[in-house]
Amino acid sequence: MYKLLCHCQAVEIELNPPNGLDNLVRCNCSMCKRRGTIMAIVDQNNIRVVKGEDKLSLYQFHTNVAKHYFCSVCGIYTHHQTRTNTSKYGVNTGCIDEINSLELENAKNIDGINHPLDK
């Protein structure tokens, strides 16, 4: 079990992926490139907003399929529903205190600039 917190701790999310955080990605799409996070991809059944759902703001762009959430108080990106598979969520590993996301080396790079849904 992992606890994800935004900077001001208004938003708290529990993650319970069965295999830990084994699916780490870095994306080069216009959004991910700017926020610079390593994301763990988890199934929708393994993520739960514990507190602060009312503090989450939603941002969508381009195809308006992916749903990007951030804390409306401190502005930190916490997670997003992916557009490739809407039953999956990308979570900001930088919001997990026990993880130093700058030291994560097993993240795979994905090509969001040339996303298959854009063709």
Image: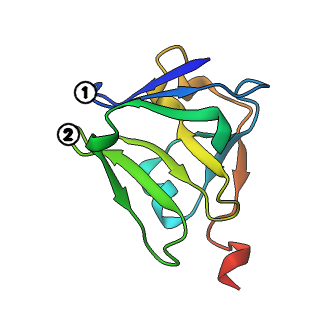
Q: In this picture, is 98 found above or below 116? A: above
- Mark 1 crowdedness (10 Å alpha carbons): few <14, some 14-19, many ≥20: few
The location of residue 78, given as percent across then percent down, is 43, 40
Q: Quadrant of the N terminus?
A: top right
Q: Of the residues shown, which amino acid type is indicated by label 1?
A: Cys
Is the C-beta separation of discs 1 and 2 under 8 Å? yes
Q: Residue at x 65, y 25 (%)?
A: 16
Q: Residue furthest right?
A: 19
Disc nearer the start of the sequence (1/2): 1
Which residue bears the numbered disc 2?
A: 73
Q: Nearer the viewer, residue 7 or 2?
A: 2
Q: x, y (%) of residue 119?
A: 71, 86
Query: Quick one: label 2, few (<14), some, or many (20+) residues within 10 Å?
Result: some
Q: Amino acid at mark 2?
A: Val
Residue 23, how many percent across, how many down? Answer: 74, 38
Q: Secondary structure at mark 2?
A: loop
Q: Secondary structure at mark 1?
A: loop
Q: Residue at x 68, y 72 (%)?
A: 115
* Closer-to-camera residue (71/53): 53
Q: Is residue 64 left or right of residue 113?
A: left
Residue at image mark 1:
8
- 61 vs 118, left or right, is left
